């Protein structure tokens, strides 16, 4: 009965989703032409391989978070549950897309990826404070998804663009999907939790502080950018917090130069 309610809510709410077909973009047997590897700038292949070895699994961790939240589904609105269903479908498609990309780039087998994922230890407890209720989860999702938008945008510019049209299109879909998740969470906050909007800014700073304090990623999907912070400017979280507040009508948008720096910044050591 609850699944029927969720499916009804998906159609009744204005959830944004692009049901792009992975097989049409990157078939499972796709092979990258050898000349892309020889033409890629020095170090790009090695760094892309290392990045993918992390990204594929953090996308799959969406299932871990979803399963945890479903144990509490009676606490949540039908619209929120519908959003989670759409979100999970996309994230698991990202997992499969990145598995295929990783296989093409590195040659690592799908069986080996399955083994590596099965060996992961997932910990929800370190992030429990951002999972208190529907409101805190939505705010954390906005923080996480807009961070992913700029993270993947950087990856697209640094890595995906060097290995052919198919791989590049995967990067574009990742950026666009995470942006839609961000907007879906924003719309639910505005429609269901407008009475708590003044709590959002302090909560965002608390989330950023928690990510800094944890200093690592606990394989539970949220706050996975802790493993990538060295790639971003020191003011990354401050800027994305302002982007979130602006999307909710609580602040002005940050300067375009500051936003552009999120995905074009280069550390001093290169």
Image (cartoon, rainbow, N blue to C red):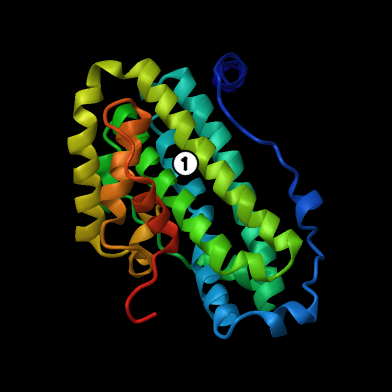
Picture quadrant where residue 90 is located: top right
Label 1: element kind: helix
How far from the left and from the top, in percent, is residue 267? 35, 73
The number of discs equals 1
Q: Is residue 204 above or below residue 73?
A: below
Picture quadrant where residue 233 is located: bottom left
Q: Residue at x 45, y 37 (%)?
A: 182
Residue placed under numbered mark 1 in the picture: 67
- Relative to the observer, which residue lies in front, 89 or 154? 154
Image quadrant containing the C terminus: bottom left
Characterize the local packing of mark 1: few (<14), some (14-19) or many (20 or more) Cα atoms within 10 angstroms.
few
- Relative to the observer, which residue lies in front, 147 or 98? 147
How far from the left and from the top, in percent, is residue 31? 80, 71
How far from the left and from the top, in percent, is residue 165? 75, 61
Q: Is residue 64 above or below residue 184?
A: below
Image quadrant containing the N terminus: top right
Q: Is residue 129 above or below residue 164?
A: above
The answer to whether residue 109 is seen in the rendering is: no
Q: Residue at x 24, y 50 (%)?
A: 208
């Amino acid at each position: 009965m609850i699944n029927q309610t969720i499916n009804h809510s998906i159609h009744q709410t204005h959830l944004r989703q692009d049901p792009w077909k992975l097989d049409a973009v990157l078939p499972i047997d796709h092979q990258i032409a050898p000349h892309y590897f020889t033409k890629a700038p020095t170090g790009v292949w090695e760094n892309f391989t290392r990045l993918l070895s992390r990204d594929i699994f953090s996308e799959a961790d969406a299932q871990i978070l979803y399963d945890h939240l479903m144990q509490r589904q009676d606490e949540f609105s039908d619209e929120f549950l519908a959003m989670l269903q759409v979100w999970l479908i996309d994230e698991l498609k990202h997992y499969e897309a990145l598995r295929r990309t990783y296989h093409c780039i590195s040659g690592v087998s799908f069986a080996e990826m399955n083994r590596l994922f099965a060996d992961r230890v997932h910990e929800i407890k370190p992030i429990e404070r951002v999972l208190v209720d529907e409101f805190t989860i939505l705010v954390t999702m906005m923080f996480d998804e807009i961070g992913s938008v700029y993270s993947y945008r950087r990856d697209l510019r640094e890595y995906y663009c060097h290995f052919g049209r198919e791989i590049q299109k995967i990067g574009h879909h990742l950026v666009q999907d995470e942006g839609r998740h961000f907007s879906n969470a924003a719309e639910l906050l505005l429609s269901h939790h407008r009475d708590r909007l003044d709590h959002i800014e302090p909560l965002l700073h608390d989330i950023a502080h928690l990510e800094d304090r944890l200093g690592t990623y606990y394989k539970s999907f949220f706050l996975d950018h802790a493993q990538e912070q060295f790639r971003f400017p020191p003011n990354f979280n401050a800027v994305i917090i302002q982007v979130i507040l602006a999307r909710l009508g609580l602040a002005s948008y940050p300067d375009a130069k500051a936003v552009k720096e999120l995905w074009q910044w280069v550390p001093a050591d290169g």
